[in-house]
Structures are given as C-alpha cells and as structure tokens.
Image (tube, helix red, strand yellow):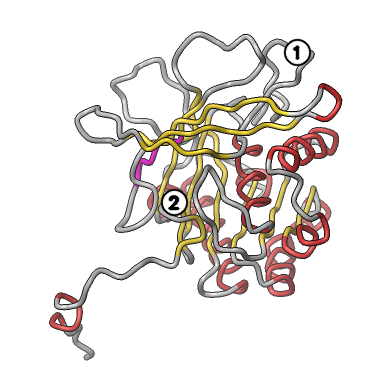
C-alpha cells in the first residue's frame, strides 16, 4: 500500500494552478455551464474559444494559448456565422490564419455518426489534441433520449471523459446544459433533468441574466455564478456588461466586467475590461445573439 506523505504536502507552499484562463478555468478541469434559454451560453463559450485560440484575454483575464475543439449541435449555421463575426470584431479582429490553426469547430457533425458519435469525437480529439473541448449542448451532442435518466447521464459522462482523456491528461472540458427555471429565489439553482451530471464534474457555473430593467440598445447584462467549486477556479460571481463597437454594417461587442465577492453580499471592485458575451441584433428589440435559444 502506498501511503501519502503528509509532510511533503503540508510543508510545501500552495502551487500555482495551470490555468487556461487565469483565476477562472484550469487545465484538466471538467466544468458544467448551465443557463436558461436566451441567456447567451453559446455566445459566451465561442468567445472563450476564440480568445484562447487567438492568444487573447477573456473577460479581461489572461489566457494560455492552446487549441480549442468545439462540438456544436445547437446553433443554426447563419446564427453561428453571425456570432463569430461579432466576436471577432469585438476581440479586435485577431489574425484569421492564427485562429484557423487554433480553433476547430465541429458543426452538426455528430448526428450522421449515430451510435458511433463518441468514437467519432474521440478520433477528432486525438487528431486535434486540443487543450480545451467545449460541448454545446450536452443533450443533442450525446443524443440523450431521456434528460431525466441518471443512468443515461452517467453513461454519457463516462464517454465524454474518455474523449477528454484521449485529447490529453491536461485537457479541460466545458459542458453546456440548460438550467431549471424557478421563480423561488430562496431555492438553490440547479440544472434541468438528471442531477448525476452535477456529481460527475469538477465545477458548476450558472450563466444568468442580470436583474433589472432591460436595456434599450438591444444588449443584455448578465452574470456568471459559481456553484460547485474545488480548490481552484472561479470562486466569485462575474458581472458582464457589453458595449457595441464599430459601424452599423460591421458591429462588434466589447464587454466590461466586474467580479463580485460571494461573501456577506459585498462586491469587490475588480473592474476589468473584457470582450463580449451576448448581444442582440440591432434591428430587433430583445433578440439574443444565441437566436433566442441559447
């Protein structure tokens, strides 16, 4: 039997985690990001993907450049194309050849694979060797038949972990889920469907619209709330306020963010510049860039 040597652990200084996004997401982590329809989950994650692949800050935080593999079974092609244009302009129009070397989008590629979808995902992950994999969203990507079936959720999670391991031990994975809507503010936020997902991941974040009067410019303020946390990663809520930039014909979005401490209801004034999260089309009053869906 191999005994853990406590003196080697307790007498050492705290290590610096191998972050992908400093203070937010670290290598090897598996995170669930859940939100209600219309909040902009996909748009936020595409921004993360382009930031990491393009060697750019994400929400004002430094990133470690690496390849990103994005499995998208959620967003229609016209919507996806517009998201990418908005994000690219908001990030300052980074090098397209560099992005093509770092960002790999599998758009509705899994439905044709049938029962071999996980094998296909593993083959793509093995070929690309990404440092970050994003699954959008879990139910269609994994072809979940019964969203409330914990056994089915457990089987799907095992397959996703296999895909993650094939990509590399230090690869992180983000799983997008829908949250369960409730008017009862005293109840703890949770995901829609089977709860086995929550116990199988390292962290859970909730992506929610900010409380308050709707803005008149078509943009939406939102927040990212950490729920399940481990020793490292996101611990404070992030408030996100987007701003239009550019001309009417070639608009982008820059995001200004603040981190709010989760203790005693007090906010920490950690103002940061950041780029983008979710937006609405200029000619529609309250249309979310995730096509009112995600």
The magenta region covers 224-228
Graded by Cα atoms within 10 Å as few (under 14), some (14 to 19) or many (20 or more), the crowding at tag 2 reads some
Horizontal relation, residue 25 to residue 15: left or right: right
Secondary structure of the residue carrying tag 2 is loop
Where is residue 88 shown, x and y percent of the image? Answer: 74, 43
Cα gap from disc 1 to disc 2, whole angstroms: 33 Å
**What number of labels is visible?**
2
Question: Closest to the observer: 173 or 212?
Answer: 212
Q: Residue at x 30, y 58 (%)?
A: 231
The residue that label 1 is drawn on is 284
The residue that label 2 is drawn on is 24
Rendered position, 277 above or below 292: below
Question: Closest to the observer: 186 or 272?
Answer: 272
> CB atoms at circles 1 and 2 under 8 Å apart?
no
Secondary structure of the residue carrying tag 1 is loop
Where is residue 20 shown, x and y percent of the image? Answer: 51, 60
Q: Residue at x 34, y 33 (%)?
A: 269
If you read the primary sequence from the N terminus, does the residue marked by circle 1 or circle 2 appear first?
2
Q: Residue at x 32, y 55 (%)?
A: 230
Horizontal relation, residue 1 to residue 282: left or right: left
Q: Is residue 226 magenta?
A: yes
Q: Is residue 170 magenta?
A: no
Our reading of the magenta stretch's main secondary structure is strand
Rendered position, 195 above or below 106: above
Where is residue 50 shown, x and y percent of the image? Answer: 68, 51
Horizontal relation, residue 79 to residue 257: left or right: right
Graded by Cα atoms within 10 Å as few (under 14), some (14 to 19) or many (20 or more), the crowding at tag 1 reads few
Q: For the C terminus, give its image quadrant.
A: top right
Q: Residue at x 28, y 35 (%)?
A: 262
Rendered position, 91 above or below 71: above
């Amino acid at each position: 039997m191999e005994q853990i040597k406590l003196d080697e652990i307790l007498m050492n200084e705290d290590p610096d985690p191998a972050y992908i996004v400093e203070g937010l997401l670290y290598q090897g982590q598996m995170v669930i990001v859940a939100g209600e329809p219309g909040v902009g989950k996909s748009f936020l994650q595409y921004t993360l993907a382009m930031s990491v692949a393009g060697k750019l800050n994400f929400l004002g935080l430094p990133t470690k450049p690496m390849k990103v593999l994005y499995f998208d079974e959620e967003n229609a092609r016209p919507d996806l194309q517009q998201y990418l244009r908005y994000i690219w302009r908001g990030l300052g129009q980074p090098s397209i050849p560099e992005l093509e070397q770092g960002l790999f989008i599998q758009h509705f590629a899994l439905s044709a694979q049938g029962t071999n979808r996980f094998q296909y995902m593993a083959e793509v992950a093995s070929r690309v060797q990404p440092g970050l994999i994003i699954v959008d969203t879990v139910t269609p990507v994994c072809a979940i038949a019964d969203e409330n079936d914990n056994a089915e959720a457990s089987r799907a999670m095992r397959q996703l972990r296999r895909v993650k391991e094939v990509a590399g031990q230090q690869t992180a994975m983000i799983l997008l889920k829908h949250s369960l809507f409730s008017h009862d503010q005293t109840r703890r936020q949770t995901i829609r469907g089977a709860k086995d997902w929550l116990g199988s991941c390292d962290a859970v974040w909730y992506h929610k619209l900010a409380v308050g009067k709707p803005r008149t410019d078509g943009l939406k303020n939102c927040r990212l709330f950490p729920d399940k946390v481990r020793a490292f990663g996101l611990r404070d809520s992030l408030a996100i306020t987007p701003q239009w930039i550019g001309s009417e014909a070639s608009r982008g979005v820059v995001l200004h963010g603040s981190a709010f401490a989760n203790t005693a209801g007090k906010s920490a004034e950690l103002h940061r510049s950041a780029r983008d999260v979710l937006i609405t089309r200029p000619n529609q009053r309250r249309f979310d860039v995730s096509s009112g869906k995600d």
